[in-house]
Image: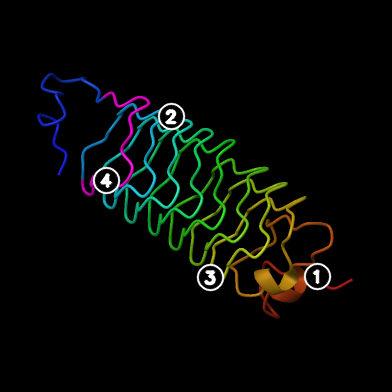
Amino acid sequence: MLARRDAGRDRPGDRLNLYRSTMSGAGLSGGDLRAAVLGLADLRGAHLDRARAAGAQFFGADLRDAFGTDADLTGANLHGADLTGAYLDRADLTGARLDRAVLRDASLTGARLGGLALAGLDLSGADLRRADLRGANLAGTVLTDAALDGADLRGVDLGGARGITPTALANAVTDARTVAPPATALAPLLPAGCPDRPPAG
């Protein structure tokens, strides 16, 4: 485990600086990476399961195929990070910055993504089953072949999302505030008698 003292952060407020470091395959599971600077770092295949990385700076980092199950990434800066094929099941990304990030084929089952700005991102092939996306902005996001079974899409803006189909949304949780792409009608997906279902006609 990466402890504060092990990381050279003996004084309150010290920040671990691993900017541009090469750490592919590194074992950081359960490590203390709070507010750490890992910008442009090579973290391909790194093990970050259960890592405490709230407020960490991962901007431009290479996190392809990294393991981050149950990681705390609240408020983390993942601007421009490559998360292709990363495993972030049940990770908490509340308040994280993900603009220009790449999430192709990422596993995000049960992840907390509520309220995030995900507009225009590439989430093709991503596993979003049971993910909490309430209030997130997915306008223009690429969702081709993404798995959405059980995903909470209440209040989500899917306007202009590409590659999404009524079939993909059939088992997602939606409501009247969910904004669907123009070619997708959500009304048939809401149960008959559901208070959120728009009236017929």
Q: In this picture, is 18 found above or below 107?
A: above
- Where residue 43 sits, quadrant-wise, is top left
Q: Are marks 2 and 4 in contact (CB under 8 Å)?
A: no
- The spot of residue 69 in percent (x, y) is 34, 56
Which of disc 2 and disc 3 is earlier in sequence? 2
Residue 27: within the magenta? yes
The dot on residue 51 is 4
154, 164: nearer the viewer: 164
Magenta span of residues? 17-30
Left or right of 3: which side holds 77? Answer: right
110, 69: nearer the viewer: 69
The dot on residue 40 is 2
Q: Residue at x 54, y 54 (%)?
A: 133
* Element under disc 2: loop
184, 77: nearer the viewer: 77
Q: Look at discs 1 and 4 and give the one toward the viewer.
A: 4
Q: Look at discs 3 and 2 and give the one toward the viewer.
A: 2
